Image: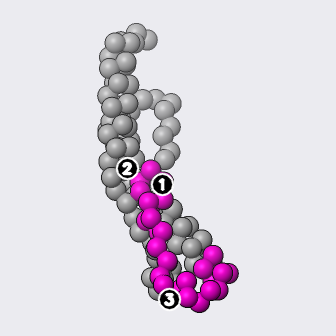
């Protein structure tokens, strides 16, 4: 079997460029998840970075630490799930770009 290494290196360079493009796009996209009927909202970008946590004045005034902690944890977890879903959708676009290379398994 004769491989064209120059062609393979060119393909890998294209793959790397596409990955960087997707990472950049993901950093500009975000999702927001809420709990407690909107009393807590968490915004996360496509690179899994928390951008903002909002807690309503009404919730803070309750001074119920356990409830606040539970609602924040729930909103963070929901936001991460949504962010991972968004990332997976973007990455599926990337894997459709890849050539079919035998033995290369990209389960994202």
Mark 3: few/some/many CA within 10 Å (<14, 14-19, 20+) = few
The magenta-colored residue range is 42-69
Q: Which residue is mark 2?
A: 27
- Circle number at residue 35: none
Provide the secondary structure element on which disc 2 rests.
Answer: helix
- Circle number at residue 49: 1
Alpha carbon distance from label 2 to label 1: 9 Å
Mark 2 or 3, nearer chain start:
2
| Residue 48 locus on image (x, y percent) | 48, 54
Q: Of 68 and 95, which appears nearest the observer? A: 68
Q: CB under 8 Å between callouts 2 and 3?
A: no
Residue 1 lies left or right of residue 21; in this view the side is right
Q: CB under 8 Å between callouts 2 and 1?
A: yes
Q: Disc 3 vs disc 1: which is toward the camera? A: 3
| Residue 73 locus on image (x, y percent) | 60, 71
Alpha carbon distance from label 2 to label 3: 32 Å
Q: Is residue 104 above or below residue 59?
A: above
């Amino acid at each position: 079997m004769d491989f064209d290494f120059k062609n393979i290196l060119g393909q890998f360079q294209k793959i790397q460029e596409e990955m960087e493009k997707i990472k950049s796009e993901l950093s500009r996209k975000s999702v927001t998840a809420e709990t407690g009927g909107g009393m807590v909202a968490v915004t996360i970008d496509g690179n899994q970075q928390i951008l903002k946590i909002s807690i309503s004045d009404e919730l803070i005034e309750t001074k119920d630490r356990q409830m606040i902690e539970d609602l924040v944890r729930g909103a963070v977890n929901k936001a991460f799930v949504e962010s991972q879903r968004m990332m997976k959708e973007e990455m599926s676009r990337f894997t459709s770009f890849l050539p079919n290379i035998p033995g290369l398994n990209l389960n994202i």
